[in-house]
Image (cartoon, rainbow, N blue to C red):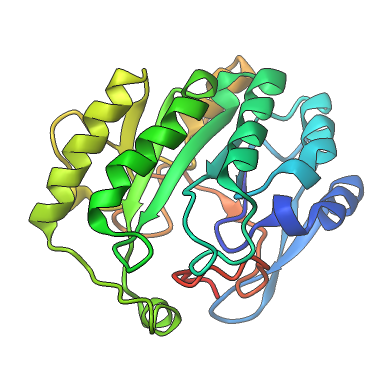
Amino acid sequence: MIVSASYRTDIPAFRAAWFAERWREGFALAKNPYSGKPYRVGLNPAEVDGIVFWTRWAVPFRGCLETVAGDGVPFVVQYTVTGYAPTLEPGVPDWRRAADSLCEIADRHGRDSVVWRYDPILCSAATPWESHLARFCEIADRVAPATGEAVVSFAQFYAKTRRGLAGHDARDPGDAEKRILLAQLRDAAAERGLKLSLCAQPHLIVDGVAEAACIDAERLSRVAGHPIAAKAKPHRPTCRCAQSRDIGEYASCGFGCAYCYAR
């Protein structure tokens, strides 16, 4: 079983103590986001084949990563670094500090153990469309030595997203605009030795860009040094993730990003 921790919230940034206790106890209880019913997820080396952590700030989680690695469980950190203005990401640490944290994880646990995410790509007053290529390049220059993959996605305007972005002069560019930018980011990534992947938006794919598998059994296998078997069972139809059990809870992240669908 692969555990996701978590695409619903930022466990490394805000719930390190909770995770450490759950790991000691060997299980976590998580709520089904639709029914509200709890389900049990085993958290011990006998039950967990690998873990994917999702975060914007992993510094509080260093000890947990050491513990998981010490117990022989492979992990991958999906590390989001966007460098957006505090008006959009009011609680997120400075992107340079986050990038340094990403590099630290790679130095300690290996290059395959971390993936840089530049997502969502948002067009707004604080993030003009034409600013993204330069922003991407600046961050890529800092993190490229530490990882081989950059994952991007374009903001999706769910009802919660639209409410959160009220007053930010946000717009959803057309597919043609998105493909042009995606091709530019692809070339910038390649110049820095990064593979560019697009998350869960296959209709926008251009040549040279892969479809992202954020719960990636192949990457976990490389980290582990042995094959990890997992079914292809994404949590949404356009996703290429392997099957996983998520232990997070919506509406529990403290960063307060204006565009977040999990607020």
Instruction: Describe residue 31's horizontal placement relative to residue 189 as left or right.
Output: right
Image: 35 above or below 137: below
Q: Quadrant of the C terminus?
A: bottom right
Residue 156 versus residue 27: which sits nearer the camera?
A: 156
Rendering coords of residue 118 (x, y %): 42, 45
Image: 30 above or below 190: below
Residue 213 versus residue 153: which sits nearer the camera?
A: 153
Q: Residue at coordinates 41% horizontally, 85% vertically from top-left?
A: 163
Rendering coords of residue 229 (x, y %): 52, 30
Whether residue 228 is visible, yes or no, is no
Residue 148 versus residue 144: which sits nearer the camera?
A: 144
Whether residue 201 is visible, yes or no, is yes
Q: How many marks?
A: 0
Q: Quadrant of the N terminus?
A: top right
Rendering coords of residue 97 (x, y %): 65, 40
Instruction: Describe residue 25's horizontal placement relative to residue 76 as left or right.
Output: right
Q: Residue furthest top?
A: 225
Q: Quadrant of residue 49?
A: top right
Image: 148 above or below 57: above
Instruction: Describe residue 245's horizontal placement relative to residue 24 as left or right.
Output: left
